[in-house]
Amino acid sequence: MTDKPEFLYEEHPDHPGWHRWGLKNSDRYNTFLGDMMVRVEDGTCRVRMLPERRHSNLGNNVHGGAMLGFIDVALFAAARSFGLIEAGTAVTLDLNTHFVGAGKIGDPLEAQVELLRETGRLLFMRGLVVQGDGPVAEFSGTIRKPTKR
């Protein structure tokens, strides 16, 4: 696949077996989530971020909006890591999420994403967000792949 020049998808120099995932330009939404890493293992894409104070709510946990943003970006990171899309031009059609625990600031969050089905234009995916040894959220979503030019 050919990556778009504004997107970052490369071997992570400090974490063998992981890729950096994100945007090179800092004035887009994705950069608010911070540095992210991805890897595929046994058909599951693992996407990690480290929540910071800027991602917190007044209870000093990960804000629900930051969690939803992370999950949405994780769907695309997984789709790209599975080799199903190029970065940048697909869209989220739906995202269903159930929060089952509080995300802690300062501890890595990991979205574990799996592909349920691929059709000509759609990707049906689901997963868990975990922190430590427990779940924080479960989700499912549909991505529409870009139109081929």
Image (cartoon, helix red, strand yellow):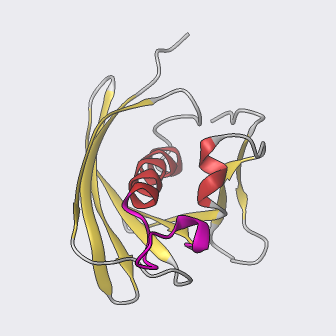
| Residue 101, image x, y percentages | 26, 77
Q: Quadrant of the C terminus?
A: top right
- Residue 62 among magenta residues: yes
| Residue 43 showing in the rendered view | no
Q: Quadrant of the N terminus?
A: top right
Q: Residue furthest top?
A: 149
- Residue 76 among magenta residues: no
Does 53 sit above or below residue 3?
A: below
Q: Which span of residues is magenta-colored? A: 51-64
The residue located at (47%, 29%) in the rendering is 90
25 relative to 32 in the view: left or right: right
- Quadrant location of residue 93? top left
Does 94 sit above or below residue 140?
A: above
13 relative to 48 in the view: left or right: right
| Residue 70, image x, y percentages | 46, 57
| Residue 59, image x, y percentages | 40, 78
Secondary structure predominantly adopted by residues drawn in magenta: loop
Q: Residue furthest front?
A: 58
Q: Nearer the viewer, residue 32 or 129?
A: 32
- Quadrant location of residue 10? bottom right
